[in-house]
Image (cartoon, helix red, strand yellow):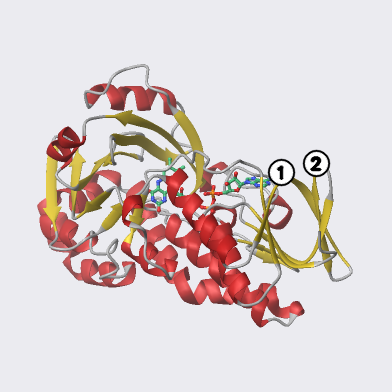
């Protein structure tokens, strides 16, 4: 065991592994502490946007790519609309395998891995002491990439209000691959208005569907009941294993770095408040955390990291939050515009494929809103 590491990372999800790989490539002596034995289960739809794939910096092995998605099917009340593109929008992966692969890439780049549950940390005299059940590690910097549910981030961020936290229920339901292909036609199947201001999804994987519902924790009081209704109304059997998970939602003004401690991925709250996409932001923020630490000086790392995140994806998260607030304020009108007008859905799904930014989309949409509103009423 080294006496003082350059960097300790808590959590080996996409944020932690991306940070570890980047830091090792920059020559930083990096230790990852992960409490679960990999491959571990992670509640997730497994939709990996094209911008997430391009951020990886290496090709995604073919056996991890379970489905190539070219379209979206959107349901709102009794309306269904489907749009396809002639190119890939998203790749479907199973998180246990995907995360294990990312971790392997980090270790191959030189990062060290230890199976430890981090209980606490203390920053003192230019060093961070990281406490686990049986030992204490020392490091110049700490990246907390331990997801949305771990409490370590609170030391940086403080209390997380319910109105900025989302809750999801998810189930993996086995099915024959041909039947999956026939039912979903290489589309992501999205159901708006399922829960109170939330949505449901059916995503095609290899040999199973990912089925879930999600919404703001303050509005989704009985997620298990909503999920059971959603499963029933879509012809899925009762009694499948349901898993709940929190997701950051609806607030971009969280504190993301303090002194020598940086938060990345879900721990920082970097999730698209409109769609729940978080893998891309986890990968990107992990990389940026490593770069900020590599560039130093130590006293400026926290500011440097915040600035990098703001410049890189701050605007996208801001526009995603704006759309999400519009949806929550005027759900009926907003969803009739987005989910019932082909031209608008067609533009919107280009965001996932990195062909368009949220800002482009909103700027394109605003002058068309009066006509769209008339059509929606
Ligand atoms: C139901 C659901 C569906 C989703 N679907 C999608 C989707 O389709 N596409 C998408 O892009 N995003 C999706 N997301 C969001 C996405 O899953 C997250 O944004 C992403 O996993 C964040 O990665 P992360 O590395 O920050 O955290 P995580 O993936 O949560 O990884 C955190 C890691 O830290 C470890 N850890 C936690 N505490 C400690 C500790 N104290 N000590 C040591 N290790 C610790 C955990 O074991 C875990 O391995 C979904 C989220 C949910 C809940």
Q: Residues within 10 Å of mark 1 (few under 14, many from 20)?
A: some
Q: Is label 1 in contact with label 2 (beta carbons under 8 Å)?
A: yes
Identify the image quadrant of residue 349: bottom left
Q: The residue tagged with tag 1: helix, strand or loop?
A: loop
| On screen, residue 165 above or below 355 | above
Residue sitting nearer the eye, 222 or 300: 300
Quarter of the image with the N terminus is bottom right
Q: Residues within 10 Å of mark 2 (few under 14, many from 20)?
A: few
Residue 206 at x, y percent in the picture:
28, 40
Say whether residue 171 is left or right of residue 21: left
Marks 1/2: CA distance? 7 Å
Which residue bears the numbered disc 1? Answer: 117
Which residue is painted at 35% across and 51% down in the image? Answer: 64
Which residue bears the numbered disc 2? Answer: 133
Is residue 335 visible in this depiction of the protein? Answer: yes
Identify the image quadrant of residue 79: top left
| On screen, residue 161 above or below 299 | above
Ligand 1 within 8 A of label 1's CB?
yes
């Amino acid at each position: 065991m080294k006496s003082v590491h350059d960097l300790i990372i808590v959590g080996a999800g996409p944020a932690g592994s991306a940070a570890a790989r980047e830091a090792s490539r920059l020559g930083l002596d990096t230790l990852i502490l992960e409490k679960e034995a990999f491959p571990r289960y992670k509640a997730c739809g497994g939709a990996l946007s094209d911008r997430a794939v391009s951020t990886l910096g290496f090709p995604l092995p073919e056996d991890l790519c379970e489905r190539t998605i070219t379209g979206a099917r959107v349901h709102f009340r009794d309306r269904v609309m489907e749009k396809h593109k002639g190119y890939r929008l998203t790749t479907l992966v199973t998180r246990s395998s995907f995360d294990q692969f990312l971790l392997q890439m980090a270790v191959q780049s030189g990062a060290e891995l230890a199976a430890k549950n981090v209980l606490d940390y203390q920053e003192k005299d230019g060093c961070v002491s990281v406490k686990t059940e049986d030992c204490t590690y020392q490091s110049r910097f700490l990246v907390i990439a331990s997801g949305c549910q771990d409490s370590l981030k609170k030391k940086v961020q403080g209390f997380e209000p319910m109105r900025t936290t989302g809750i999801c229920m998810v189930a993996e339901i086995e099915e024959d691959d041909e039947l999956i292909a026939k039912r979903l036609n290489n589309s992501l199947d999205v159901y708006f208005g399922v829960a109170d201001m939330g949505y449901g999804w059916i995503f095609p994987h290899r040999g199973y569907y990912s089925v879930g519902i999600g919404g703001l924790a303050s509005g989704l009081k009985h997620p298990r009941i909503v999920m059971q209704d959603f499963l029933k109304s879509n012809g899925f059997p009762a009694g499948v294993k349901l898993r709940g998970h929190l997701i950051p939602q609806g607030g971009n003004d969280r504190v993301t770095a303090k002194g020598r401690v940086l938060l990345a991925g879900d721990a920082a709250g970097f999730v698209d408040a409109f769609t729940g996409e978080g893998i891309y932001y986890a990968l990107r923020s992990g990389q940026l955390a490593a770069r900020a630490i590599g560039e130093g000086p130590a006293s400026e790392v926290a500011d440097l990291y915040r600035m990098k995140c703001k410049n890189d994806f701050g605007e996208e998260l801001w526009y995603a939050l704006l759309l999400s607030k519009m949806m929550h304020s005027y759900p009926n009108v907003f969803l009739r515009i987005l989910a019932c007008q082909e031209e608008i859905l067609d533009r919107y799904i280009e965001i996932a494929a990195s062909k368009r930014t949220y800002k482009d989309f909103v700027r394109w949409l605003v002058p068309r809103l009066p006509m769209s509103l008339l059509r929606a009423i």
